[in-house]
Amino acid sequence: MTTSRRSFLKHASLATFSLWIPQTFAEASTARLARSTPEAQGVSAQAILDFIEAVEREKMELHSFMMLRHGQVIAEGWWEPYGPDLVHTMYSMSKSFTSTAVGFAVAEGKLSVEDKVVSFFPDDLPAKVSDNLAAMRVKDLLTMATGNEKEPTQVCVKEENWARTFLAQTIAHQPGTRFMYNSVATYMCSAIVQKVTGQTILDYLTPRLFAPLGISGMRWESCPRGINTGGWGLSIQTEGLAKFGQLLLQKGKWNDKPLLPAAWIDEATRFHIQQPGEDKPDRPKAQNDWLQGYGYQFWRCQGAAFRGDGAFGQFTIVLPEQDAVIVMTSENKNMQGQLDLVWKHLLPSFDAKSPQAADLSQLKTLKLTPPKGRKTSPTLTNKSYQLETNALGLQTVSFAFEGDRCVFKADAHTITCGLESWNHDEAAFPGTPPRLISGGRPKTAMPAKIAASATWTDDTTLVLTWRYYETPHSDTLTCTFDGDGVTITFLNSITAMNPKAKDTRVPLKGRAIA
C-alpha cells in the first residue's frame, strides 16, 4: 500500500480533501448524461447490435442496457414494459453503494476501516466476545472476510435485531483470512454508518452522491429497526447506475468537483482477497468473473475491469482502460454467460480501427412480448367465485372481460390485464412481488407497479402474466375452469428458474357464486 493511500485510510477528513457537498438541491446536477454516437467515440455500433442479438438469441432476459464511452451515452435501450424513468430492484448491486457510504464516512473522519466492529455495538454484544469477533474490522465486513462459520443472512433477517444476531454467530476463522459471501456483513456496514452519522445510508448518500449526480426517486428497504438493508434493497434507475459507474471511472470527481477522494475509489476497487475456487473442465479460473478477486463490495473482472453486481444480472461494469461504463438490469440466472457476451461483443468494439456504423434505432423498440395463445374462449364468461379458506386470506375472485381486457379481482385487489398485450396497473396483491430474500419486506403489502396480460391456452385455461416492472420478476397465474369451479395456481419467475422448485403458494380453489 502506498504512503498516500495508507494516510488517507487513517487520517481522511473533509478538511484534507475539500470534498464538495451541495448545500441545496438547487446546486445539485439535474442533467442527464451527455449523448453521442458509437462512431463519434470510436466504438463499433455493429458490435452493439451483435450483443443485443446474442442476448435475445440466448434468451437472456435483459430489462435495460446502457453503454458509455468518454463520459457520453453511446447506446441505450429498455425492454418494454421497463423504461428509463422507472427504478429497478438492484439486489446485491446495492452493496457497492453501501461501500461508497462507508467511503464518505471515512473521508469525513467519522470512522476508519481499521475500526473494530464490536466498538460500534456495545449493547448488542454476546455475553462472551471471542477473540475472532473482537478482531473483526470494518475492512473485514467490506471484503466479505468476517470469518463466519456459516453465511448468516437467512438467520439474521428472521430476527428483529439483525446486528445483535450477527454478532452472536460463530466466528470460526480469523477475520481477514477467508472470503465468504455475506450479505449481512454489508448490512453491518450500513448500521455502522447510521451509528456514526445519525442517518440511514440513503439519507446520508443523498446530498453527497445522489443529488450531485442528479439521481432522484431511489428507494432502499430497511430492517425492522429502521436501518437500510445495505446488502440488498436499493431501487434506482438505469441512468443512476450509469452515473455511479462514471463517477467511479472519474475517480470520485463529478463536473470537475471532488465528491469522494480518488484514493478511496482506488482502495475500494482494487484486489483485496481471493475467492475460493479452481479451474473447472468447462471454465478455467482465469475466465471466471467470480474468481478474479474482491475489493470493498466490488468484484474484479477479467482484465482490468471491475464491477458491482446483483442477483439476476444487475450490473455496473467499469472499464478504466477503455474509459467506458456498461450497465444492465435483467432477470437472468446465467450471469457469467451475460458477462461472456459483454467480453465477446462489446469489449472488442472499443478497439475497432475503423468503427463500423449501424442503425441503433431498434434499441428504441425493444420489448418483452406477452405470452400468446388466443384472446377468446367458449368459457368466456363474467363470473365470481367463492374461495375455499386459503393462506392468502382471500375470499372471492372474479373475472370480467371488457373488450380487449380481462379484469381480475380478488377481494379488494383489482388487476386489469390486456388480452395478449401489457396493461399497466398497480396493486398490493398478497405475497407479491416475488423476492429472493425476505428481509426488508414491509409488514404491510405495498402497491407494486404491474404490467399485466392474459391469454387463453385452451378452452378452459386462462393464463395471467403479471410483470412487476420495478423489479426483475413476474408471476404467472394459471386459472383452470371446470364447470362451476376454478383452480388458480401460481408460479413466480424466481421459482421457474429452478425446475425442481415449487411455488410456496397453495392453489386457490373456488365455486361460482350464483
Image (cartoon, grey):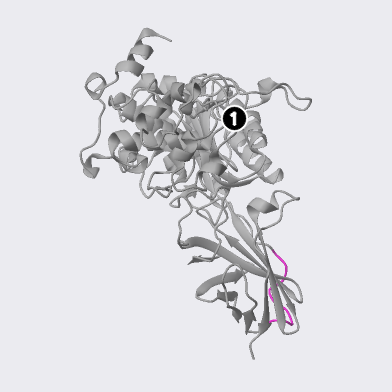
**Residue farthest to the bottom, as pictured:** 514
Q: Residue 369: x and y, percent?
A: 64, 58
Magenta span contains residue 25: no
Q: Is residue 409 left or right of residue 333?
A: left
Of helix, strand and loop, which mostly describes the magenta segment?
loop
- At 70% from the left and 77% from the top, the residue drawn is 486
- At 48% from the left and 40% from the top, the residue drawn is 165
Quadrant containing the C terminus is bottom right
Magenta span contains residue 379: yes
Work out whether residue 178 can be spotted.
yes
- At 56% from the left and 75% from the top, the residue drawn is 410
Q: Is residue 490 left or right of residue 256?
A: right
Q: Nearer the viewer, residue 323 or 38?
A: 323
Q: Residue 406: x and y, percent?
A: 60, 75
Q: Secondary structure at mark 1?
A: loop
Quadrant containing the N terminus is top left
**What amino acid is found at the position of numbered circle 1 in the picture?**
Glu
- At 56% from the left and 50% from the top, the residue drawn is 472
Q: Nearer the viewer, residue 190 or 156?
A: 156
**Residue farthest to the top, as pictured:** 3
- Return the residue at label 1: 149
Q: Residue 279: x and y, percent?
A: 73, 21
Query: In the picture, residue 152 is in which quadrant?
Result: top right
Q: Which stretch appears magenta?
A: 372-380
Instruction: Give the vertical position of 222 relative to 276 (above or below).
Output: below
Instruction: Give the vertical position of 87 relative to 281 (above or below).
Output: below
The tally of labels here is 1
Q: Is residue 188 left or right of residue 276?
A: left
Q: Is residue 10 left or right of residue 244?
A: left
Q: Nearer the viewer, residue 85 or 140?
A: 140
